[in-house]
Amino acid sequence: MTIAIYPGSFDPITLGHLDIIERASKLFDKTIVAVLRNPNKSPMFTVQERLSQIRLSTAHLSNLEVDGFNGLTVNYARMRNARVILRGLRVLSDFEMELQMAHTNKTLAPEIETVFLATSKEYSFLSSSVVKEIAKFGGSIDQFVPEHVALEIYRCYVKTQPGSTPTLPALDLKSNRSETDPLL
Ligand code: ADP
């Protein structure tokens, strides 16, 4: 049984990530999407929020697990008996850093292989940062992230930058509001 881990920040999950996850679920017996708890970054969403977003987006995949981890990716991979670290490649600029990471991980854990999946061409420009930047300036992100994630991003900007809310037909914040929602 081949287990792959797909580590990353996923802050937030995009359709580019989801595409890699769906393709991985056909290639490996089990894929674990592993959200890194990185104390050096100030994320938009907490790890708990990101885990929930990914779980909701991948509910249709049965051989998938979503988990959080700290520390070295190879240590987490070993703990989960994973033989593969999966990464996505978009543009040439990804390659240098990804190759360096792959070589480092191979040195630390020779039994674990890094496998790269090339982005699907419609998502080659897409990153979590691009999505956040578009939303920040009031643009529509509905075609870049799952619907529930788009709503959560819009809510964040309503909270932090009142007045800069995107004027989108899809953005009906009231109807998505729960009694206990602390963000609205
Ligand atoms: P990290 O901070 O580890 O790069 P990300 O969440 O940005 O975390 O990315 C996780 C992985 O998903 C990386 O391998 C990245 O290259 C890949 N990835 C991100 N966006 C896309 C996309 N649009 N298409 C394919 N792979 C992607």
Image (cartoon, rainbow, N blue to C red):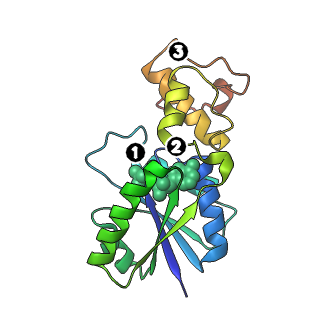
Q: What whole-number distance in Å separates the C-alpha atoms at marks 1 and 3?
A: 22 Å
In the image, 99: left or right of 108? right
Res 30 → quadrant: bottom right
Q: Which residue is mark 2?
A: 127
Sequence-wise, the earlier of marks 2 and 3 is 2
Crowdedness near tag 3: few (<14), some (14–19) or many (≥20) residues, C-alpha within 10 Å: some
Pair 2/1: label in front = 2
Amino acid at dot 3: Ser
Sequence-wise, the earlier of marks 2 and 1 is 1
Does the Cβ of the disc 2 residue fall within 8 Å of ligand 1? yes
Does the Cβ of the disc 1 residue fall within 8 Å of ligand 1? no
Amino acid at dot 1: Thr
Q: What whole-number distance in Å separates the C-alpha atoms at marks 2 and 1?
A: 18 Å
In the image, 74: left or right of 120? left
Residue 16, numbered label: none
Q: Which residue is mark 3?
A: 164
Q: Which residue is mark 1?
A: 46
